[in-house]
């Protein structure tokens, strides 16, 4: 029997769709998977994006006994004591799930940086890793590893004109009091708008009167990301827009018409995302500004569905999929600004044949270069460990996920969600063991 033991480490508050997809593919290909969401009482992480430590000794022991051969470590969030307990015999792959600038466990990484393989989800990742690490990455230590999808096109009634799934990043408070409402703040905003990761040390020199520039610059970045998303959605909210996601409950504070577009239905799982996209005529992508050359992983999910994608121009999207689509499709799928988004949305809603032409092209592009099997074949070739097509018919699956101590959900709903997200979703796997640590432990 041929198999690989693969540990997936990540942080997620709400959405699990991408990790659902990766897990599905790995299990379907005969790999044993241990999936650890560190947003969990078993992990101590006082500040998001800084240091994480496993505080559950039995769970730490179980992970070590799993003997991972490959670690897929999103944003380097794997607790440092777990990493050290596992040792260096496995292939530890760091994936920039968020920008490299938001990587976890920085001190530990700098002390062990030569022992990792760095996977980049955007073409700009290699340079960002090298700047952060202070060293050049050769082909042995770096691999371009863009996102992919397992979503399938399904026949659904398309009762939504336009859908958007995502987070509302807009600030819902008055930040930093007076400093935020000054000419200096507007000037800093313009610099960050031009370069989202503008050097904070330069800002400190240029604006000496701003107190705590690190926090201030991050607040400006958050405001920028939130306001840009709001502006684009406002441009189509009268065309039949439906918004799903988190932190939209208070959007009436910004725009009551936009708030009326929010559907409170929880969309968390792979199946739920697949249903929303297949039942939408158009689905919008609005990438976070931290994606310098790339785009949200939701783009591939939309492309694989019956919905017509609309997205901003991104170099990596053209590089990955441009050869598989007509110029007409690219013309109508890519918007230049929010006014162009509105105009193209109207055209796509009015012209069913054009929309279907675009969807067919998008579907073909995904089959050519947008499936997770394609990405994992590239990874297995790089690391010399078989991932796709293993012969294990009885893979083991352990999922340590966000628990009640963090999310305050009732246990009965929690168990129901686990069953829906897990056992029902991957019913093609004969035997799967779930370790319900968060429920069963005394």
Image: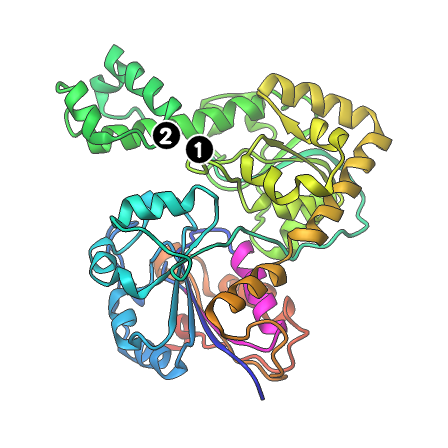
Q: How many marks?
A: 2
Image quarter where the C terminus lies is bottom left
Residue 251, placed above or below residue 102? above
Residue 25 seen in render: yes
374 lies left or right of 331: left
Q: Nearer the viewer, residue 385 or 394?
A: 385
In magenta stretch: residue 35: yes
SS of the residue at dot 2? loop
Q: Earlier in the sequence, mark 1 or mark 2?
A: 2
Tell me which corner region of the image, top left, top right, bottom left or bottom right, holds residue 335.
top right
- Residue range of the region highlighted in magenta in the rendering: 17-36
Residue at mark 2: 196
Residue at mark 1: 289
- Pointer 1 with pointer 2, Cβ within 8 A: yes
Image quarter where the N terminus lies is bottom right
343 lies left or right of 234: right
| Mark 1 surroundings within 10 Å by alpha-carbon count, few (fewer than 14), some (14 through 19), many (20 or more) | many
Residue at the image position 76 percent from the left and 51 percent from the top: 153
Q: Nearer the viewer, residue 349 or 364?
A: 364
Residue 52, placed above or below residue 360? below
User: What is the spatial separation of the Cα atoms under label 1 and label 2, in whole angstroms?
Assistant: 7 Å
User: Measured from the top left, where is residue 414 in percent x and y?
Assistant: 49, 63
Tell me which corner region of the image, top left, top right, bottom left or bottom right, holds residue 81.
bottom left
Residue at the image position 59 percent from the left and 53 percent from the top: 148
Residue 210 is marked as none
| Mark 2 surroundings within 10 Å by alpha-carbon count, few (fewer than 14), some (14 through 19), many (20 or more) | many
SS of the residue at dot 1? loop
Q: Nearer the viewer, residue 185 or 142?
A: 142
User: Measured from the top left, where is residue 143 in percent x and y?
Assistant: 46, 56
Q: Name the outermost residue toward the bottom.
A: 1
Residue 436, placed above or below residue 111? below
Instruction: Name the chief secondary structure element in magenta.
Output: helix
């Amino acid at each position: 029997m041929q198999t690989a033991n693969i540990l997936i480490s990540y942080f997620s508050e709400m959405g699990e769709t991408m990790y659902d997809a990766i897990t599905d593919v790995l299990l379907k290909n005969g790999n044993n998977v241990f999936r650890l969401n560190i947003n969990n009482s078993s992990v101590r992480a006082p500040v998001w994006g800084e240091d994480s430590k496993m505080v559950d000794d039995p769970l730490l022991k179980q992970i070590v006994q799993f003997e991972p051969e490959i670690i897929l470590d999103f944003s380097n969030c794997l607790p440092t004591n777990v990493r050290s307990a596992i040792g260096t015999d496995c292939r530890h792959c760091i994936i920039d799930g968020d920008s490299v600038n938001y990587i976890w466990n920085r001190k530990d990484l700098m002390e062990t940086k030569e022992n990792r393989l760095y996977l980049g989800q955007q073409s700009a990742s290699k340079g960002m890793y090298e700047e952060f690490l202070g060293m050049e990455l050769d082909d042995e230590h770096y691999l371009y590893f863009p996102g992919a999808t397992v979503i399938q096109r399904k026949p659904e009634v398309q009762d939504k004109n336009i859908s958007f799934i995502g987070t509302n990043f807009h600030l819902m408070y008055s930040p930093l009091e007076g400093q935020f409402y000054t000419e200096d703040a507007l000037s800093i905003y313009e610099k960050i708008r031009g370069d989202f990761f503008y050097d904070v040390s330069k800002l400190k020199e240029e604006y000496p009167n701003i107190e705590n520039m690190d926090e201030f610059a991050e607040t400006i970045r958050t405001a920028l990301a939130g306001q840009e998303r709001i502006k684009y959605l406002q441009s189509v909210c009268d065309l039949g827009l439906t918004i799903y996601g988190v932190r939209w409950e208070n959007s009436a504070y910004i725009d009551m018409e936009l708030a009326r577009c929010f559907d409170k239905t929880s969309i968390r799982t792979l199946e739920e995302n697949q249903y929303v996209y297949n039942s939408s005529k158009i689905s919008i992508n609005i990438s976070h500004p931290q994606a310098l050359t790339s785009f949200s992983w939701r783009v591939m999910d939309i492309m694989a569905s019956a919905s017509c994608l609309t997205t901003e121009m991104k170099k990596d999207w053209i590089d990955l999929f441009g050869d598989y689509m007509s110029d007409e499709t690219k013309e109508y799928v890519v918007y230049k600004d929010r006014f162009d988004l509105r105009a193209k949305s109207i055209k796509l809603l009015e012209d069913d044949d054009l929309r279907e032409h675009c969807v067919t092209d998008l579907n073909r592009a995904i089959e050519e270069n947008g499936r997770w099997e394609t990405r994992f074949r590239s990874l297995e070739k790089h690391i010399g460990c078989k991932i796709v097509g293993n012969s294990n018919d009885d893979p083991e699956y352990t999922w340590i996920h966000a628990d009640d101590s963090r999310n305050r959900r009732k246990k009965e709903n929690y168990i129901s969600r686990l069953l829906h997200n897990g056992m029902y979703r991957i019913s093609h796997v004969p035997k799967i063991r779930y370790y319900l640590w968060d429920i069963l432990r005394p």
